[in-house]
Amino acid sequence: EIMKIHPDEALDVYSEAGRLLDVYDRDHRVAAKTGGAGMGGGLSGNAFAASLPDRRLLELRAAVQCMAKRASRVTLGICAEDTTAGVGGLKDWVTALSLPRGSLHGMDVDGVPIEIPGHIYIKYNSGTRTFADIRANGGIAWKPGDAFLSGYDGDFEGVGFSPWLPTDDEDALRLCAYLPLGMFNG
């Protein structure tokens, strides 16, 4: 049987998801700032994320899925210790959020694989870029689900989750600091 949710209840679930992500974001930023270990407090932020109890991780997973389902588009900023961890995290998040899969750029030059040592950053976009964005970035076009991989010098590890959520006038970008990379693993 299909569960029917009254519109007011759906709004309550959405509001609670936003509240959970706001609390996590605040706590993560406080941990990074007060701990101060690593570039920008990245190591302290990572330790905070790694210390989350299973129940809180489950709540955050549900909140992220709720927001992604409502969003017109989602961007992910993945910071990882290496290419294997980053690409694995990208696959887990895209699958868990039912986002489109596109091409992963930055792992080769003219079809020849390149090695990217150390930390990496992957920028993923479930939507497309505007023509103004394409012109401003030298003609690089994004297709739904495309991602770009590059080296990264920072200490943060995790996923910056940014859903574009509908408002009365237009879509508004919501930002959430680095959620655990492995949150949707297995």
Image: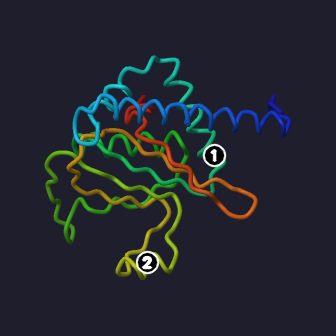
Q: Residues within 10 Å of mark 2 (few under 14, many from 20)?
A: some
24 or 3, which is in the foreground?
24
Q: Amino acid at mark 1?
A: Lys
Label 1: state its secondary structure: helix
Residue drawn 28% across the image and 39% down it: 85
- Dividing the picture into quarters, in which one does residue 156 lie? top left
Question: Seen from this angle, which residue lies furthest front?
Answer: 34
90 relative to 125, above or below: above
Q: CA distance from mark 1 to mark 2?
A: 26 Å
Residue indicated by mark 1: 69
The label on residue 170 is none
75 relative to 86, above or below: below
- Residue 45: give x, y in percent of width and height: 34, 32
Q: Amino acid at mark 2?
A: Ile
Q: Is residue 154 left or right of residue 17?
A: left
- Residue 159: give x, y in percent of width and height: 40, 42
Q: Is residue 42 left or right of residue 7?
A: left
- Residue 18: give x, y in percent of width and height: 62, 38
Residue drawn 47% across the image and 18% down it: 54
Q: Nearer the viewer, mark 1 or mark 2?
A: 2
Please identify the quadrant where the N terminus is shown.
top right
Q: Is residue 129 left or right of residue 185?
A: right
Residue drawn 34% across the image and 35% down it: 33
Callout 1 touching callout 2 (CB < 8 Å):
no
- Residue 93: give x, y in percent of width and height: 45, 42
The label on residue 134 is 2
